[in-house]
Image (tube, rainbow, N blue to C red):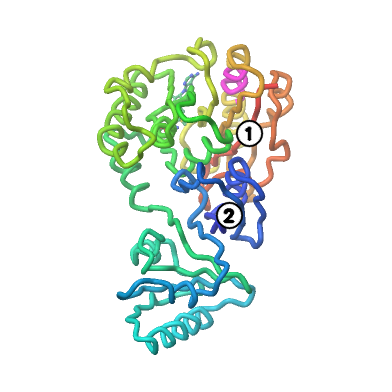
Amino acid sequence: MIYLAILGRQPEISLAELKALYKDVKQISPVLATFSSSKELNDFSRLGGTLKVAIKLNQKPLDYLATLPKGKITIGISDYSTHASRQTATSLALKLKKILVRHGRSVRVVANKEAALSTATSLHNGLSGANERKAEFIKVNSDWYRTVFIQDIESYAARDQGRPARDAKVGMLPPKLAQILINLCGLLPKGATILDPFCGTGVILQESLLMGYHPYGTDLSDRMVDYSKKNLKWLQKNFTAEHEQTTNLPSDLAEQSVFVGDATTFKWQTPIDAIACECYLGSPMSQIPSELKLKAQKQECSDIILSFLKNLATQITPKTPVTIAVPAWLRENNEYSRLNIIDEIEKLGYNVNNKTREGLLYCRKGQIVARDILILRKK
Ligand SMILES: C[S@@+](CC[C@H](N)C(=O)[O-])C[C@H]1O[C@@H](n2cnc3c(N)ncnc32)[C@H](O)[C@@H]1O
């Protein structure tokens, strides 16, 4: 089955996430990729970097709509063709409506503010594919697709802002980025153990649980371990019922899964199937650091990251995937200064998949400390 992905705000990261899970991933424009998927992997809610997924139609939208049972139809058009505009999308939608009305159907068209409908507009108009009479058609030159998944903005906000234990100082990892870090480890069997040795408030643990994996977290700080436990318990109570892969979990899962431990010396329980984490990112910063401060921060972060990887290397089996977000700092020239640790990491017994590190820098415009994603595998 051929699918189309509308890539998120940082397309290179979205693309890397798709490539880690699916076959035949091909970028067809700056914001679009096609891929093929099996049934096993068509729960697209695990994708943090993809805004919408659509399925390729082997008929025109009109032919698809003509097969629908009686009743009101809602249609939306998103045009991603080379010369797309709001006008072309609107006239395509109105043309469709005209023909359908002539055939006695009642039709509502979702208005285009731009050539493509935003995720929020598609979602709020129920165009996620769950109701066959509410359809979003996506045009890419001569090809047509129908939306079958839209990222649930509200669920992300609830999972993020609704958590009972939050701490602005440790930096709040967005749930979407937590999903990306986990997915960059590749497809793992259901129930696989994902370790986060810098678990903080537990965002990666939460998202691992929702994906049907077993979360395992450690952190140096007692307070963070308490926060992670609280948040996991809350998630289990409020969210897991919607996710069939998380049924029959033990009621003391949080107690069994999170522990205090220094990542540079801790002996974890094995086996560990994958490691996904956001390491220590240095001190929180509200302005660009001086050269002196940057040097000290780089030294401190490199020491912790390399000692952690050295400790981990003796405890995992060859080929175990390790995805880590490490800090990079904004400089006056608007570029980010990264940690120079790739050679050291290789010497510790890891292959670095993204050595050139092109594009895998996760940040919002002007953010002082960005997250630089490293994709490793134990040799
Ligand atoms: C950037 S935060 C991670 C935030 C986390 N992703 C979350 O969801 O809240 C880094 C965490 O690393 C922890 N930490 C720092 N040094 C550590 C060490 N040597 N071993 C284990 N944890 C450490 C801090 O306590 C902090 O919670």
The Cα atoms of the two marked residues, 1 and 2, are separated by 28 Å
Q: Which disc is residue 1 wearing? A: 2
Is 326 drawn above or below residue 347 in the view shown?
below
- The picture quadrant where one finds residue 2 is bottom right
Quarter of the image with the C terminus is top right
First reached walking from the N terminus: tag 1 or tag 2 = 2
Q: Amino acid at mark 1?
A: Ile
Identify the residue shown where x is 42% and y is 36%.
207
Q: Is the C-beta separation of discs 1 and 2 under 8 Å?
A: no
Residue 209: x and y in percent read: 40, 32
Q: Main secondary structure of the magenta part?
A: helix
Of residues 160 and 125, the one nearer the viewer is 125
**Kind of residue at badge 2:** Met
Nearest the eye: 302 or 7? 7
* Farthest residue, direction bottom: 102
User: What residue is rendered at 52% in x and 16% in y?
Assistant: 271
The disc label shown at residue 29, or none: none
- The residue stretch that appears in magenta: 302-309
Q: Secondary structure at mark 2?
A: loop
Q: Is residue 171 magenta?
A: no
- Residue 309 screen position, x and y as percent: 61, 20
Q: Which residue is mark 1?
A: 375
x and y percentages locating residue 240 in the rendered image: 32, 36
Given residues 151 and 135, the one toward you in this image is: 135
Location of residue 331 with respect to 72 vertically, above or below:
above
